[in-house]
Image (spheres, rainbow, N blue to C red):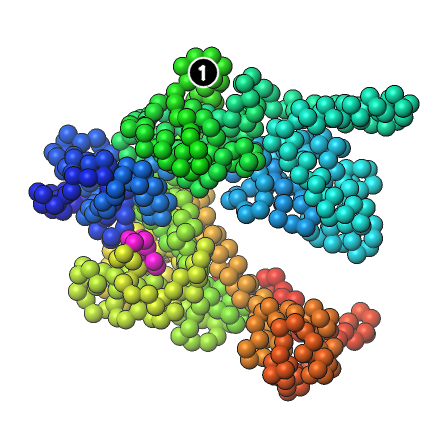
Amino acid sequence: MADPSSYRPKPGQIPDSPGVYKFRDEHRRVIYVGKAKSLRQRLSSYFQDITNLHQRTATMVTTAASVEWTVVSTEVEALQLEYSWIKEFDPRFNVKYRDDKSYPSLAVTMNEEFPRVQVMRGPKRKGVRYFGPYAHAWAIRETVDLLLRVFPVRTCSAGVFKRSAQIGRPCLLGYIGKCSAPCVGRISADDHRELAEEFCDFMAGHTGTYLRRLEQRMKDAASAMEYEQAARLRDDLEALRRAMEKNAVVLADATDADLIAVAEDELEAAVQIFHVRGGRVRGQRGWVTDKVEAVDTAGLVEHALQQLYGDESGDAEHSGGSGGVPKEVLVPALPTPAEPIAQWLSDRRGSHVSLRVPQRGDKKDLMATVQRNAQQALALHKTKRASDLTTRSRALEEIAAALDLDTAPLRIECYDISHLQGDDVVASMVVFEDGLARKSEYRRFQIKSFAGQDDVRSMHEVISRRFRRYLLEKQKTGEWDGEAAGPAESGEVTATADAADRDDLPGGPIDPDTGRPRKFAYPPQLVVVDGGRPQVAAAQKALAELGIDDVAVCGLAKRLEEVWLPGDDDPVILPRSSEGLYLLQRVRDEAHRFAISYQRSKRSKSMKAGALDSVPGLGETRRQALLKHFGSLKRLRSATIEEICEVPGIGRRTAETVAATLAAAAPAAPSVNTATGEIIEADDGVPPGAEPSDHRGQST
């Protein structure tokens, strides 16, 4: 715990101008980002007597080890930079709203030749129009089912669409009139796109004109005594009206607005947002957060506005659904000051945005409804969270007691080895913090120091490599003066859970410019290995060789779920009902899953390697083009150089190289179907029998 006076800036160093500041901890990790109209006044407030600070603020300044700032011209620039840094660094002491669920939206893929209507979750994609979000996926499907009667837009997947086109027969929806069947040419691409545009217009709230036109067509059909057509149009009108009833009118003046309400207590806060378009509620979503910093309702609203509109642009009228920035944003309390964030919203919309607190009428009544939703969401979250926190805390305490640890292991790392009969040996590292998986810090390894099957030796290598990188960073900062760390191995980490990392970057696990963790920046309190006494001994030996004596080690053996400690002849037996054992099992099983998924991906990649993979300078795109043109590797092998040159992107020199490589490579031996005696030729370039088995030979 640092003394704030040890890193307090000298008098006169802090400028009296707008800016954004960052607090970093001893590992150079950014732990808090803030903005200020006057950096001097704001930062000075952090370095007063700790007893006068809010408890959360005091925890932050004692965790920090340094502070730095960036001067900007205006408060709007400070707001933009603060949002960018919070998104980039994910500081632990900033309020960060998280969706209490992944809300589904109705999406129309206008970026495809034949647009498709479907349910989508996750980040928005370019060229797709979104409507929602909705509270439940079934609500989207009910709406779509009603509208397909009038707007028979394609809803099938790419595979079903391609299959129907090949066989010349539409799917069931095409037969019952809920799809215009563009797959078999019943409607042209242009007419189908026009149909999708009409669907989007109706969903965006432009309903009056279309309903009147449909009603007039119904009357004309009845006057012409075309009663079957009139009856169908009548049913279409009824279906559209039922779909519209699902979004009741809440504001009679056809307002486009977002209403934001906050419910909070001392520890947590919940935010609810209603998206109103054309006077109707078109979407709803909710967020919850831990109040890790001292912040009032106005501050929570400001953070919510940043998260809600930080990645939006344009006005809501033309974005479809709840996207974009609406004309009005109604909030329970205005940020202080309100002008910079109102200007920021206007800049993102491209025109004026009204940011205000509703005082009377329908908008105030609707805000009360949104507020009730926020309160219910907070109560429900606290019910779930209380049980969850209690269970996790008890599990960590039980582990600490069973392993005789000084404190509860807030960070646990687990390692597992996986291979297929000694080939493609890999390892995984998973991280649990406070009893929860931290997937962004998962790592996976390739075993490099030897070939073959040796789980104990593999475990020693993985633990050594992980902690050597940790010691390297401590060496750079002067916290470690031993010589055990040694140089970092180039390429020792092959991939992360979310994105590939590079090992050849300078500066150790923490980037000195950004403060973001690169590799293995933080040590665990407990290392868990999947295995018994030999694996535990190997892990302990690796730590001892590096001079690390403050990290506990244990192993969890699958057979009897025994917990092994280094040097002990007998295992520790935790009760079957123990929450601590359950947490260790979850950690071990996650490491096992992560290792097997990596090993299978490597195995699959190696099995799919064909003769074309060995052609120098031939990339994936041109390999696919060759196979698509000739249909099989067998036909490609028998093709002439002139025929190979006919493939787009293949020149004569490349064609000669392909022909020479295929001629030199011996064709794969044929497989025999043992049931029929039939010889099966490898016609697709994939060796026969290359389909990988599931678990055979899988070692853990």
> Left or right: where does residue 292 sit relative to residue 594?
left
Task: Give the residue displayed 44% in from the left and 68% down from the top.
Answer: 446
**Is residue 407 in view?**
no
Give the image location of residue 493, x and y in percent: 40, 65
Query: Is 122 displayed left or right of 231 in the figure?
Result: left
Residue extent of the magenta highlight: 514-524
Q: Residue furthest right?
A: 225
Residue 648, image x, y percentages? 65, 72
Q: Is residue 239 above or below residue 388?
A: above
User: Identity of the amino acid at label 1?
Assistant: Lys
Q: Is residue 373 visible?
A: yes
Q: Nearer the viewer, residue 583 or 336?
A: 336
What kind of element bears circle 1? helix
Which residue is found at the position 80% from the left and 26% from the top?
217
For label 1, the residue is 364
Classify 10 Å Cα crowding around label 1: few (below 14), some (14-19), many (20 and above).
some
